[in-house]
Image (cartoon, rainbow, N blue to C red):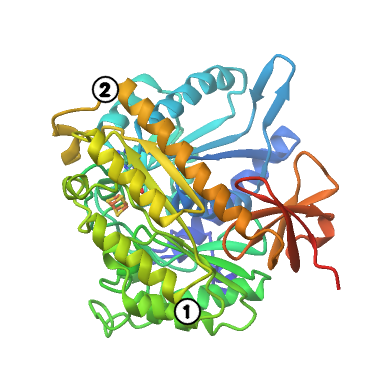
Amino acid sequence: MWNKTLLDSIDIAGPAPDAEPQRQYYYMKKCREWAIAEQDRLGRKLTYLAETLGCQMNAKDSEKMTAILEYIGYVPGGEHEKKDGKSIDADFVLYNTCTVRENANQKIYGHLGFLKNQKEKHPSMKIALCGCMMQEDDEIEKVKKSYPFVDLVFGTYNIYKLAELLYVQISSGKRIVDVWDEPGDIVEDLPGKLKYNFKTGVNIMYGCNNFCSYCIVPYVRGRERSRLPEDIINEIKGLVDDGVTEIMLLGQNVNSYGKKFGTEAGSSADTSSVTGSDTTTFAKLLYKVNEIEGLKRIRFMTSHPKDLSDDLIKAMAECDKVCDHLHLPLQSGSSSILRKMNRSYDKESYLLLVDKIKKALPDIALTTDIIVGFPGETEEDFLETLDVVDKVGYDSAYTFIYSKRTGTPAARFPDEVPDDVIKDRFDRLLDLIHRKSEEIFSSRVGKTYEALIEETNDHDPSMVTARLSNNALVHLKGDASLIGSYIPVTLTESKGFYYIGEVKKP
Ligand code: 5AD
Ligand code: SF4
């Protein structure tokens, strides 16, 4: 959310202010001036194309960056499906990258190969790469050496500087590479565009301190730092005023919210009294968010099982707006693999936690992440994972084949699991997950739930797609006028991992 009064007051005749967000507002206005001239020259609007890989954090970062681009004057577009394939002529192409698994990196290089050719046909195109993959030295070097047509390279810590970086690029005509090793201040009051205007994500913290042995995130997104509760609440209130009714509180490990506050640049709050304070917890934040009038649903992502406190379970039970869904990454069901993964819980404690959650929240839908083929994973270890999946009964699970990430401890672990063994385990895991989720989904057929209508169905325009509090999707008859409304829907049929439903009969 931006501070419109402050934005209006910025004078771009003089030098750029040092303070944030004023500095970014200044560059946004400078770029806008340039964009107007550029549009006159070309006789058309400037277009942008933004591609986002990876998690919800990246999706949120992209929302912020596209809002900046739209303020500058870019409109979405510049991609064309043709008989002989796709063509791109966007004036600004943004790739927000992910590096959690190797195949995400390969995808980006594939895209860049294609873009080189497109840019030759449309020399006004600017190409920007940002996000997690750009925090890795090897990848920056590779882009610098082999992809000279990329105009802007930045990382995860300075996405809010997009307008400033673009302005420097425009003014100099040179490629700009600006990747920070450390996070800077948390900058408040920057614009945020919403993909859906009734729901959005809200960052509550950045970074991760867990150092799971396979994971690159702590190296590319830095140490944990939380936003002040006042800033979060103000942002949500502003969003609700703009029509948002569902928010997802975002952080790599939301359960450790409040342990360390970031330095807030542009924050209205006095940070001195709370920096380093341990008196604010995620549970307390949930109660505060739950009080916001006009807000209907609260979700959050992601919870680490080791930090999921009794207070949080109580808060989830007591806050009526908190949805009946918890994403609780398991990663492996084997205590010995979990130790090697540095997850700080074992099979038994995970199952006890799940029992506790189910007792306190009987309607909760659980989802999870599981990695197959971690170094040293034996058939016995894998059977433990199947056992947990069987006992917990997840609504759905994201399953990943272990991907070796250079620089993480696990990259040096012995006993890599052969590909054919991984494939066999992966298939067996998927099979069990599907069987269990089908059972769970069928058990709800005939019941009525409040559903938020999210979009019209891609394949059948007479249908809309809605989401239940437990995160399940349901397709029902309806049209675009229903989008954004909450309607009681009776589930008439389970399709395994989604439902067919109808508006509840009076
Ligand atoms: N290999 C495979 N999966 C991984 N994840 C994180 N790092 C790796 C890796 N190196 C998965 C975890 C995490 C999810 C976001 O991505 O399951 O929860
Ligand atoms: Fe990666 Fe573990 Fe942090 Fe999640 S909790 S981002 S898996 S290090």
Q: Is mark 2 within 8 Å of ligand 1?
A: no
Q: Earlier in the sequence, mark 1 or mark 2?
A: 1
What residue does disc 2 label? Answer: 418
Label 2 crowd (10 A; few <14 / some 14-19 / many >=20): few
In-front residue for pair 137/301: 301
Q: Can you see residue 268?
A: no
In-front residue for pair 13/170: 170
In-front residue for pair 248/466: 466
On the image, the x and y values in percent for residue 200 come to 57, 61
Residue 282 is labelled as none
Q: Residue furthest top?
A: 84
Horizontal relation, residue 3 to residue 182: left or right: right
* Residue at 54 percent of width and 73 percent of height: 236
Q: What type is the residue that disc 2 sits on? A: Pro
Q: Quadrant of residue 104?
A: top left
Q: CA distance from mark 1 to mark 2?
A: 44 Å
Horizontal relation, residue 369 to residue 83: left or right: left
Horizontal relation, residue 303 to residue 243: left or right: left
Q: Quadrant of residue 131?
A: top left
The answer to whether 311 is drawn above or below residue 476 in the figure is below
The answer to whether 299 is drawn above or below residue 496 in the figure is below
On the image, the x and y values in percent for residue 153 come to 39, 37
* Residue at 75 percent of width and 41 percent of height: 458
Q: What type is the residue that disc 1 sits on? A: Ala
Label 1 crowd (10 A; few <14 / some 14-19 / many >=20): some
The answer to whether 269 is drawn above or below residue 133 in the figure is below
Secondary structure type for disc 1: helix
* Quarter in which the N terminus is drawn: bottom right
Q: Is mark 1 within 8 Å of ligand 2?
A: no
What residue does disc 1 label? Answer: 317
* Residue at 58 percent of width and 23 percent of height: 123
